[in-house]
Image (tube, grey):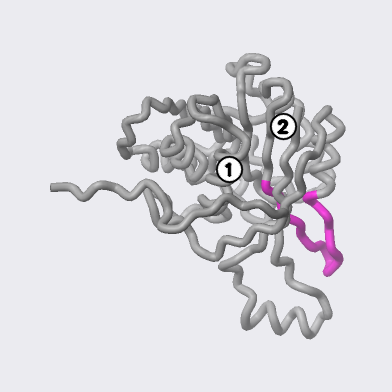
Amino acid sequence: MKTAIKLHPDEFELECTTVWSFPRRGNWATHKPDWRGNWAPEIVRNLILRYSKEKDHLLDCMIGGGTTAIEAKILNRHITCIDVNEEALKQTKKALEFKVGNGAKQRVIKCDARNMAFIKNEEIDFILTHPPYVDIIKYSEGKIKEDLSGIHSIDDFCNEMERVASELYRVLKKGKYCAILMGDTRRNKMYQPLAFKVMERFLRQGFVLKEDIIKRQHNCKATGFWVNKSKESNFLLIMHEHLFVFQK
């Protein structure tokens, strides 16, 4: 006889400040940490509970390993999941192979976030997604031309993210919210505020900024080689990301 799947974390409390820290990875439902760069299920759960209601239609336009899809299913939200990477879509479909019984629907579709023509204007109640941070993690090693993680130039990346922002603005209902998690990087030892550059592109498309949440990074390799490099070359290791919540 199969053991019933655990659908909720052992301890969970809705975040109420602009600093979030989740040292544990999700150990409920079908969550797995094996998709590089995936975001913590606690982030997704907090966002869904705060910015949507049951039976709302959610969108994650870069679904990755399926974290958002799992939480949406558990929390009784319909969701559209898209990605340009077939492996991401395959993993998401597999992650959704559990029963809840609440009637929430999921559609998993291969699509470029810069052109989501199959989604109607103002069809979506809430958007949440975790884009790549330029080419820090290359998800397709250049094999998929639409993959934004293949772009090295920060300016070019921001230009493409503005195209994504334009589509997200189109499909989102007026007054509703869009949340994205973005990090920064370094080039030639100098800090590059990638998150704020992307934020500016979303504002340019008409969004307004409701929240800027600082999310502490965990499980980063901040020992050994990189600690020594930090001391030798006099630069600090980046251990935070920005979780922007926009409103249309």
Q: Is residue 120 above or below residue 228?
A: above
- Determine which residue is flagged by label 2: 164
- Mark count: 2
Crowding around mark 1 (Cα neighbors within 10 Å: few <14, some 14 to 19, many 20+) is few
For image coordinates 85% across by 40% down, the residue present is 200
Amino acid bearing label 1: Lys
Q: Is residue 193 left or right of residue 51?
A: right
Mark 1 or 2: the one toward you? 2
Q: Which residues are magenta?
A: 181-195
Q: Quadrant of residue 228?
A: bottom right
User: Quick one: which residue is furthest to the top in this view?
Assistant: 120
Res 38 seen here: no
For image coordinates 84% across by 44% down, the residue present is 155
Residue 218, position as x, y percentages in the image: 59, 66
Residue 64, position as x, y percentages in the image: 53, 43
Amino acid bearing label 2: Val
Residue 193, position as x, y percentages in the image: 83, 55
Residue 196, position as x, y percentages in the image: 83, 49
- Determine which residue is flagged by label 1: 143
User: Quick one: which residue is furthest to the left in this view?
Assistant: 1
Which of the pair 186/33 is nearer the observer?
A: 33
- CA distance separating discs 1 and 2: 20 Å
The dominant secondary structure in magenta is: strand
Q: Is residue 110 magenta?
A: no
Q: Quadrant of residue 226?
A: bottom right
